[in-house]
Image (cartoon, rainbow, N blue to C red):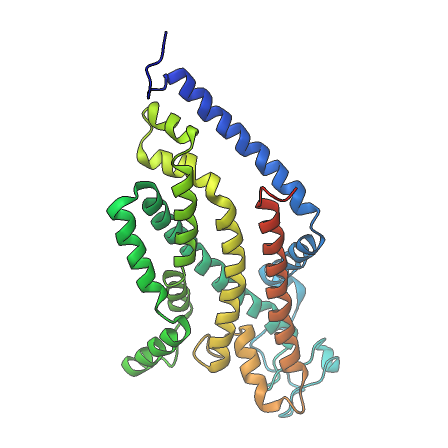
Amino acid sequence: MAVQTGQISPNLANVAVAVADDDYARERHLTWRKFSRHRLAVAGAIVLLIIVIGAVFAPAFTHFDPFAIDDAWQGTPLAPGVAGHWLGTDEVGRDLWARLLFGGRISLTIGLFAVIIEVLLGSFIGAVSGYFGGWVDAVLMRVTDAFLCIPLLPLLLVLTAIVAAESTKAALNFTSIVLIIGFLSWMSVARLVRGAFLSLREKEFCEAARAIGSSHFRIMFRHLLPNAMAPIVVQATLDVAGVITLESVLSFLGFGIQPPTASWGSMLANAQENISIAWWAAVFPGLCILTTVLAINYMGDGLRDALDPNVR
């Protein structure tokens, strides 16, 4: 039976959608092969995995309580190796190795959950904007531009001052930091998804999905979004490193995670006063931040190359 111009038969549409899904599966296999050839990315992924395992299973790697003060403490930090403390103690005699492990939980969790919020919100706004276009696209992109004008770190400091003025708290809590960073960091993801959707919505498989009666929601999130995952994954990976750095800066300035809870940034801040006699209390938290951020950035570079169709 002849197919009229501008129409697609249901059988041909189903075939087109199935072919698109098969191509997506092959691309994922090729992506893994290219990523595995990127040595720095693989090394970064391994280092990051080790750090995550250490944070998640922290009690298994130390017998010290991160909040307990050692009886051997006499007013000055204990040096590495003294009284069984591998990396020494902090300014009040708490085991530094234990606090690094448990502090990693805070820093990594803030980075992970803030980026999850960022990706979910940014992907939804970018998908709606790029798929529908027209006035919907114009309104959402102007809102995105408005949010891009908001400086994140100064805003966090202002919100901290507001919280301190209206309550007995001196800083934002864990949940507040995650929510604020997540809800103010989605703009780059939204723009990436919008750009991908503007191109993908004109592809044959998208027209085929429309021809077989797929809903807008199904087309956007079943057919288009998986094909736009490459820039999202790269952006999300790099943003995790940015959020960890931002949390460390906040804690270092005294506006983030508050004592006695440990985070790498707060440990750096607390080590300032004794850095001349206890260098280890500042060096090891700094190395944790540096190593984690470098590992994530290298992994992000590898993902970017692996997901780039022009790199073979």
Q: Residue at x 57, y 45 (%)?
A: 307
Residue at far right of view: 81
Q: Is residue 139 left or right of residue 195?
A: left
Q: Nearer the viewer, residue 71 or 135?
A: 135
Side of 97 relative to 160 (left or right): right
Quadrant in which residue 33 is drawn? top right
Image coordinates of residue 62 in percent, x first then y, are 66, 68
Residue most toward the front?
Answer: 5
The answer, for residue 211, to whether it is visible in the render is yes
* Residue 221 spot, x, y in % from top left: 39, 39
* Residue 170 image-quadrant placement: bottom left
| Residue found 50% across the figure and 60% down from its top | 239
- Whether 6 is drawn above or below 283: the answer is above
* Vertical placement of residue 193 versus 79, above or below: above
Residue 205 in picture, x, y percent from top left: 43, 29
Q: Residue furthest top?
A: 1
Q: Is residue 154 left or right of residue 137?
A: right
